[in-house]
Structure formats: C-alpha cells, structure tokens
Image: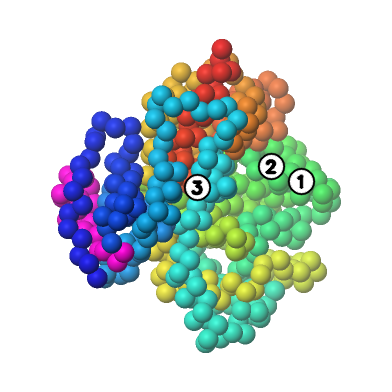
Amino acid sequence: MKQTPWLGFSIDRGAAMPVFEQICAAIRLRAASGDLALGSKLPPTRVFATELGVSRSTIVTAYEQLVAEGYLSSQQGSGYLLCASGEVELTQVRDLTPPAASEPVARNSGLQPRSSAARPFRAGSPDMRLFPYRQWAKTVARVCRSDPQSLFLGSSGFGSLALRQSICDHVAEWRGISALPEQVIVTAGATDALEICLHALATPGDRVALEDPGYRPLQYFINAQGLVSDFLRVDDSGAVLPSGRVAPRLAILTPSHQFPLGGAMSPARRMEFIQWASETEAWIVEDDYDSEFRYAGRPIPAMAGFDQLHRTLYVGSFSKIFSNALRLGYLILPEPLVGRFGDSIQRFGPKASSMPQQPLADFIDKGEFYRHLRRVRRIYAERRRFLLEKLAQDFSAYGYCVDHQAGMQVVFHLTCTLKDHEICARARDLGLSIEPLSGFVQAPKPERDAYNGLLLGFCGYSVPELELGLAQLLKVLQQLSC
C-alpha cells in the first residue's frame, strides 16, 4: 500500500463551487491522471482539514461522496483508499464538471447527468449511489450461510420476528415509542401500511380526515374503498382538527414533517388531536415517512410516543432511509387492534417480501444501518445547504423557501405572477422533474391559489447535478417572465 503525501492543491473560497466539491474534483482529476496510484491511502481527515484550513466535516463529506462514486473505499481503522483511476474515470470527471458560465446550453439538450435516473428535482428520492452495497452483500451472504430458510419463511403474516424486534429497538431509541414485536407489521412500504389501515379500520361510507395539501395517492385508496374524505386545512401549527357534525373514523397525519409543506405540528395541536381521538373513539394514523432526516437539533418525538399507542397507529418506512428497491416499511399498532389487523392481513394477504427481512434485521443489529444513516444524513445536509443558498442567492426575485431543517425536499414559494404548473411543464422539456405545489391541494379556488410553489427534492442528486438543474430552472423562469 502506498502512503499518499499531501495532495498539493488549495481552496478557492471565491468560487461558486462548494469547498467540499472542489476537494472531490481535485481528487478525481489526480486519480484520472495517474498522479494517485491504485491503493494509495489518502491523508487522514483531521490532518487534511488542517492543511487546507477547512473543517474536518468538509473533508469527511468529500471523502464519503467519492466513496459513493466508486473512487475511494473505506474500512474501519484503515482510512480511505483509492480504488479507481484511469481513462474511464476521466470521462466521469468531465461529465461531472459544470459548464463554464459562457457555455450555451441547448433548450432540449437535457442535463447529461452521470445517471439516466438523475432528473432533478424529484422529491423523496434517496441517492442509491450511496447505498452500502458491499456491506449489504456481506450481510445477505452471512444470513445465507447461517440461516437460509429465514430468507423465504416469515414467522407470520406480520413478518419476520427478528426484524420486528429490531424495529421495536429502533423506534424506542429514535422516536420514543415503546412497543412489542407482536404490535409490529412488516409492510411493503408506507403506502402499503396506509392501505392496510384503511382496510382494517374503515368500512364503506366512513369518513377519513386528510391533510390539505397532502399525499395524493391516499385519495385514490379512499375512493376505491367507498370512503368519504374530510380535508383538513394546514396552518402554522399543523393540520386543524375536524369540525364536521360527523366525526371521521380516522385521521391520517404527518405531524413530524408535514408533506408537502414541511412544517412540524406543534405540541399543543398534537395533544388536541389525541384528545379528539379519545373523545370521538377515532384513530390517528401517523405517517412518519422521513422523520430520520432532521438536520438540526434532536428528532421531534413521534405523536405515537405522546399517545403511548392508545389511539395512534405509527407508520414508518425503510424506503427513504435505506433503499427504495427493497420496498419495506412497518406499521405499529395499539395492542387492542392486533387481532383485528391479523384478521385483515389473513384476508388480503401480506405484500412485503420475506427475502430481505432477516438480512435487514441483521444489518440493523450489527450497526451497519445506523452507520449508513449517519453518512447519508451528512451528505444530504450538504446538498440541502447548497440548494437553499443558491435559491436565496439567485432566485429571490421569483420566490423564497422556508427552512424547516428536515426532510428530503423543500418548497420554493413563488411570489411572482408565474404559475407553478406552467413552470413545471416547461421544466419537464429540459429534463427536470419538478412537481407543482398546487397539485397537492384539494381546496377549491380561491384557496388553491394561495399554494403556488415548486417542490424541489435534493437528496438524490449530487451538488453538480443540483447546480446544473438550478441553471436550467433559472432559464425557465427567465423565459416565462419575458
């Protein structure tokens, strides 16, 4: 193994490119040119940070980004090693370099990202380039050797007992929820969990309270089951309580991070909902789809923790944190509902695949899941910071963002005369994937007109991809303003 000396470059603090990306670009170029040999050990993060005059977290973010891109490998106790170089990587470096300011970009040429799936700014998409493939493969192989039957046989329709125990440990530590494995159902994601709740708790003609704006697919499930929707306006404290003469049978809420607006429900409003559910014998379904992605302070306690699972059911997902390909989530029930949900699952059948459940339990128990979570949260935080800074710097004439310091997307509220759906349609022609805020609203005009904005996801895209996407979006806004 070759020990690499100081890499010999300096930081341009006046450049538009973030510092961590300057470090990434310099290492990519040295790897591509052969200045760094395969197997070279990069400088320790603390030493390199001191030499460049930057924070250690900046160096860690740069190294982890290069690990995700395949340039570096990382092993505990061994530091970061170069594992890719040569002409193949040189092509990737060129693809990742932002065009010069004077370089024209054809209107229909697209962004030419590294991956065909990179279409900024799709909301809620994790970056699967950051997935810990090697560690996951080792975990699957270990389970295959020691307990191959567990890959195909779940302990019950509720899912793998080992995974349900791991979920209980996870939510106790991260969300303040105390539950037994018998109260946990492994689902095929959060959407499957919500559908299970509707099957088990409601019958045709029942009313279901939904946030407005909110998650659109829920409306399709509700209509398909012959249920009636009651839409709850969202204010600064969260969703308002139902006010109709007939109380809804259940309310589906996103109290920790409202979708799509992004705010958190106030403690007072949470207690009002819990009291309302107790008085009306209704149920609250708490959809906590991305609660782990909080970038400042401690995680907000779950409503189910406040309620101690009395009238609240808790829905979580691994799709946003870990992998959208595994399609795994979970539903945590109040004890009195376990039998009813067991009957419902026996009637409709479980949808969650049994194969990844035991490996995922092992992945959580061995600490690999939390290492991955800490890593992606650090990288996503850097991407989010870059996006918000660029929006404030270059887009202030068109709107603003409210920073809720959480989630996988932000809302850019338009203050100009442009309409969000027109912007999104034009942006689609340039290879962008942006959803209009008005598309999540059920309220009629003129209330709907107050929701004029763009939903911008940032987790699935590197800083260069975000920068290119923002350049295209700015071009759309300038064209439509003429």
Work out whether residue 112 or residue 11 is closer to the camera in this orientation and state it: 112
Tell me if residue 317 can be seen: no
Compare marks 3 and 2 and give the one earlier in the sequence.
3
Q: Position of residue 346 (x, y in %)?
A: 77, 72
Residue density around tag 1, few if under 14, some if 14–19, many if 20 or more, within 10 Å: few
Residue occupying image coordinates x 31% and y 52%: 33
In the structure shown, which secondary structural element does the residue marked by tag 2 occupy? loop
Q: Nearer the viewer, mark 1 or mark 3?
A: 3
Apparent side of residue 98 relative to residue 141 in the rendered image (left or right): left
Residue density around tag 2, few if under 14, some if 14–19, many if 20 or more, within 10 Å: some
Q: Position of residue 166 (x, y in %)?
A: 50, 72
Q: Amino acid at mark 3?
A: Arg
Kindly check if marks 1 and 3 are in contact, taking CB atoms under 8 A apart as contact: no
The mark found on residue 114 in the picture is: 3
Q: Which residue is mark 2?
A: 216
The mark found on residue 139 in the picture is: none
Work out whether residue 156 or residue 93 is closer to the camera in this orientation and state it: 93
Disc 3 to disc 2, how far (Cα)? 31 Å
Among the 4 quarters of the image, the one containing residue 395: top left
Residue occupying image coordinates x 63% and y 31%: 429
Kindly check if marks 1 and 2 are in contact, taking CB atoms under 8 A apart as contact: yes
In the structure shown, which secondary structural element does the residue marked by tag 1 occupy? helix
Among the 4 quarters of the image, the one containing residue 438: top right
Q: Nearer the viewer, mark 3 or mark 2?
A: 3
Q: Which quarter shows the N terminus?
A: bottom left
Q: Amino acid at mark 1?
A: Tyr
Q: Which residue is mark 1?
A: 220
Residue occupying image coordinates x 24% and y 36%: 12
Q: Which residues are magenta?
A: 38-56
Disc 1 to disc 2, how far (Cα)? 7 Å
Q: Amino acid at mark 2?
A: Arg
Tell me if residue 10 can be seen: yes
